Structures are given as C-alpha cells and as structure tokens.
C-alpha cells in the first residue's frame, strides 16, 4: 500500500530532516527532480529539450525556490528559462541568484503574459503546502495566458493541500511533482494534479503511520481470493444476494452477476426477481425469500429492494444472520429512516455501508462537504462499520480510523446500475473471509479497473463493466 500524510505532519517531518541536513541540500535535490520531470515533459511535448522555453511562476517561499533551482538545472541543458516573480522582494534569493548565474532571466507581472504565451512548459511554484484558499488577483490574472503543459511543484497552486478543494482561481497541472511523501490532495483532487510523481528526499524515516492509504495493483492482486487444490464451492465463500423488486429487477441481476464473476464459490439469490436471475445466471441458487435462502457466509442487501415495510423486513432478517453484510442503496436509506433496524445486528458482526453523497447525507444528517476524509471516518465510528463513500475518489473508512482512497481512472462509473455491480463485488470478498476494510477497497479498485476496460474511451453500461470483471481480476493476478 502507498501512504499519504497530511501537510501538517509532512511539514513537521521536513523540519526534523532539515535539522540534520546541510543547508540547501534538500531544496536542490527536490529541484533536480522537478527539472528531470520538466525535461521529460518537454521531450514528449516538443521532441527535444534544448532550445525549449520554460516559464517559472515564482511565489515567495520554498516552492518558489524549488522552481528557481529547477530553472537553473534546465538552463544547464540549454533551455531558455524565464522566471515570473509574483513578489520580487520575497523571491528565494539563493535560487534567483543561481538562475541568473546560469543565464536565466526574471521578469515581473507586467511581462508575464508574453512569457507565458511563448512558453513550451510552465512550472508552477506559486505557493506551497502552507497556503490556503484560491490564487490571489495577480496570480489569478495569469491563468488565461497559460496554454502550455503545466508542471506543479508539490501541488497545483490554489488547491487546498489537505482537502483537495478549490474555492476560486487555481492551477490545473498536467503533472505534479511532490517530495518525500504524497499529500491528500493528490488523491482527493487528481483532476487538478494530473499525473503525480514522487521524489524521494529521505523523508519517510521521519514519518509514522499514514493518514490515508492507497491500494495498488499488486496489493489487490495478492489479496484477491483464488481457489487452491483443496477448495470447493463452500470453502471459496457463499454469497447471498437480497436485491431487486418488481420495479427494479435489474438490480438483482447486476448484483448477483458481479458476485458470480468475482469468483464466489456459490451465489444464493433471494427475492422477487428469482426467475430472471436464474435465467441470466443458471449457476445461482435462486429462491423467492431470504428466509428460504439457505446458509451463506456474507450477504449483500439493498439494491432495488424498496424502502417500504417489505424491504425493511428483508434488511432486518439479513442483519440478524450473524454473517458479514454489505448494505447498499435502499438498505442505506432504510437505515437512515429506521435506525433501530441495526438492533438486529449482533455486536461486532462486520457491516459495510456503501453510500453515494446523497445517501451519506441521509445516513449522517450532513453532506460530506470539503472534509470528506473526516466525514467518512466519523461515520465509520458512529455506525461501527466500514463506510465506503462513493465518488471519483472513493473513500473507505474502518471504525478504527484507517482510511483507503481509490482514485477512479475516469468517470465511466457514473451510470445507472454500477453501484449494484460494486455491492456484488464487496459481498463476494466478504464471503471469502477478507478483512471488510480491505474487501471494500479491493472491490472498489477492481470495479474501477473493470470500468476502464469496458469503456476504452467511450461510455460503458453497468452490464459492460460487470462483464469486464474477470479480465480486470486476471490482470491483477498476474501482477500479484
């Protein structure tokens, strides 16, 4: 897993590292990493590095210093470098002197439009991790003149470093180079950051456990359950699906199908869409009621069951079974309306809640707003459950405070039925015995990868996403 730390902890760790490092050494190491990435981008954009033109947007403080030193290194490779000084009196003196010695030049805001419009690459060093709020007027006025790719130093200026929010004018980067460790905005607002590259400056020994985690392909491929020589249909996990209604039979088919394709040993469906499910998935044992379903090792409940008394009875029965439960869609609405339904759950029995933003607001009484991480952690503690808050960046929080972030590869999952597919994946992994927090995170990862495979650059349906699940798992297993 890859760790992500809040900016306050990063700054404190940097302070400890600076105290035992020769003056200027860390900045030059960071700046060299910026220059290497800038050269890569120039080569990709122009086909050459030498004779290219780079504009530096330089604010006060160390981020501006990083940009200036990076400009010096680029000058050594024959790049024409011009620094736009937003506050000349507070520009990093050593970095500015180094750039000028190397033949770079510095201009003020009045000359910035021409410099930016002629640039082949713009390096954003306006503000650092301490900054909050949008770009100020002078810097904001420059945005309309930027047409070249942008390389951000640590963060795109104007984006909140801990929440990833944007409250006004802000940079949109093509690539962001960050130092020592990744920060929350890199996963909470990937659209603004572009590709994130991490430069090692020796910071990790100064940091303890991360504030957020992000799974990679190897993590998911290794964790995904696969049958061994002594397994049978029962030992691989029996997943129960309580979903669908006369109005929403498709929810039953989608949730059941994803559990089948996620390699559950057996899937039992219980509900009014039994005939339709049986027709689509003949390997599924389908009955009309959860009371007749038989033994399962985890339940998925909620997609399309409705929010009336019948749905409430189904949810209460499933929660009373003493096995892990993934409660999705209508189940979250029922829990919000009738909190006492959770009394049917045995204390300590794993529960995964999978709300989108609207369902989250119904569950908790408040929208997640800017601090999505804080909101999902509080909800996990309140319900003593793993809470998966859907979004372009999906957050998965455990009651003990652990948080996973899963960054989607696109917006293909913003389509009807995709949540039903995700719930089937979660249920399958719960039935296999995987830790509920990891199960929810791995399911979100495969869900996103399957959507990417299904879409191939064009919109894809939930059915298309579902049929791509085996290919997504196959890719991950090769890596794991």
Image (cartoon, grey):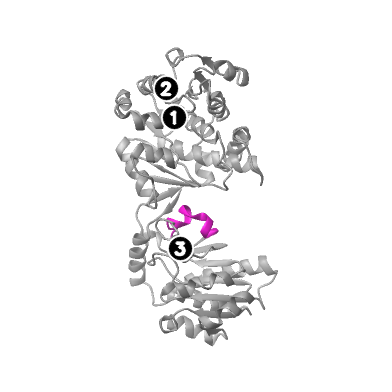
> Which residue in the protein does label 3 denote?
168
Which residues are drawn in magenta?
180-196
| Element class at badge 2 | helix
Taking the magenta stretch, the answer to whether it contains residue 237 is no
* Cα–Cα gap, marks 1 and 2: 8 Å
- Residue farthest toward the top in the current orientation of the protein: 292
* Cα–Cα gap, marks 3 and 2: 44 Å
Q: Is residue 51 above or below residue 408?
A: below
Q: Is residue 128 left or right of residue 175?
A: left
Q: Measuring 34% from the left and 60% from the top, which residue is drawn there?
A: 9
In the picture, the quarter occupied by the C terminus is top right
Looking at marks 3 and 2 on the same chain, the residue that comes earlier in the sequence is marked by 3
> Which residue in the protein does label 2 denote?
311
Q: Nearer the viewer, residue 210 or 412?
A: 412
On the image, the x and y values in percent for residue 15 come to 34, 68
Residues at circles 3 and 1 in contact by the CB criterion of under 8 Å: no
Residues at circles 1 and 2 in contact by the CB criterion of under 8 Å: yes
- Residue farthest toward the right in the current orientation of the protein: 47
Q: Report which quarter residue 13 is drawn in.
A: bottom left
> Which residue in the protein does label 1 denote?
330
On the image, the x and y values in percent for residue 172 come to 53, 63
| Element class at badge 3 | loop
- In the picture, the disc for residue 338 is none
């Amino acid at each position: 897993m890859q760790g992500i730390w809040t900016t306050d902890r990063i700054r404190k760790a940097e302070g400890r590292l600076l105290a035992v490092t020769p003056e200027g050494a860390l900045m030059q190491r960071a700046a060299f990493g910026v220059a290497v990435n800038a050269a890569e981008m120039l080569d990709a954009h122009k086909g050459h590095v030498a004779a290219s033109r780079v504009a530096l947007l330089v604010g006060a403080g160390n981020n501006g210093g990083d940009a200036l030193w990076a400009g010096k290194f680029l000058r050594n490779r024959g790049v024409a470098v011009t620094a736009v000084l937003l506050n000349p009196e507070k520009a990093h003196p050593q970095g500015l002197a180094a750039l000028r010695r190397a033949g770079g030049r510095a201009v003020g805001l009045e000359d910035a439009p021409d410099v930016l419009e002629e640039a082949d690459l713009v390096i954003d060093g306006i503000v650092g991790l301490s900054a909050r709020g949008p770009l100020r007027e002078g810097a904001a006025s420059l945005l309309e003149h930027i047409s070249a790719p942008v390389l951000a130093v640590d963060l795109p200026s104007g984006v909140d470093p801990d929440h990833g929010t944007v409250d006004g004018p802000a940079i949109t980067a093509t690539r962001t180079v960050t130092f020592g460790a990744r920060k929350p905005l890199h996963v909470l607002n990937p659209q603004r950051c572009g590709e994130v590259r991490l430069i090692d400056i020796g910071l990790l020994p100064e940091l303890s456990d991360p504030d957020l985690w992000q799974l990679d392909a190897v993590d998911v491929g290794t964790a995904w359950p696969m049958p061994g020589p002594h397994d049978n249909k029962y030992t691989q996990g029996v997943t129960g699906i309580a979903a669908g209604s006369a109005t929403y039979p498709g929810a039953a088919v989608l949730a059941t199908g994803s559990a089948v394709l996620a390699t559950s040993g057996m899937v039992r469906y219980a509900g009014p869409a039994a005939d339709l499910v049986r027709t689509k998935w003949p390997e599924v044992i389908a009955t009309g009621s959860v009371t007749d379903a038989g033994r399962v090792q985890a339940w998925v409940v909620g997609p399309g069951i409705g929010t009336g008394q019948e749905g409430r009875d189904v949810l209460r029965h499933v929660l009373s079974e003493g096995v892990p439960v993934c409660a999705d869609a209508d189940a979250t609405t029922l829990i919000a309306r009738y909190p006492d339904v959770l009394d049917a759950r045995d204390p300590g029995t794993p529960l995964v809640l999978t709300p989108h933003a609207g369902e989250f607001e119904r569950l908790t009484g408040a929208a997640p707003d800017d601090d999505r991480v804080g909101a999902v952690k509080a909800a996990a503690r309140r319900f003593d459950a793993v809470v998966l808050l859907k979004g372009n960046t999906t957050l998965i929080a455990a009651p003990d405070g652990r948080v996973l972030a899963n960054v989607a590869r696109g917006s293909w999952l913003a389509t009807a039925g995709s949540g039903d597919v995700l719930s089937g994946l979660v249920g399958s992994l719960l039935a296999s015995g995987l830790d509920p927090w990891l199960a929810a995170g791995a399911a979100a990862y495969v869900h996103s990868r399957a959507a990417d495979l299904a879409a191939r650059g064009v919109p894809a349906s939930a059915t298309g996403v579902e049929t791509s699940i085996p290919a997504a798992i196959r890719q991950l297993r090769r890596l794991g």
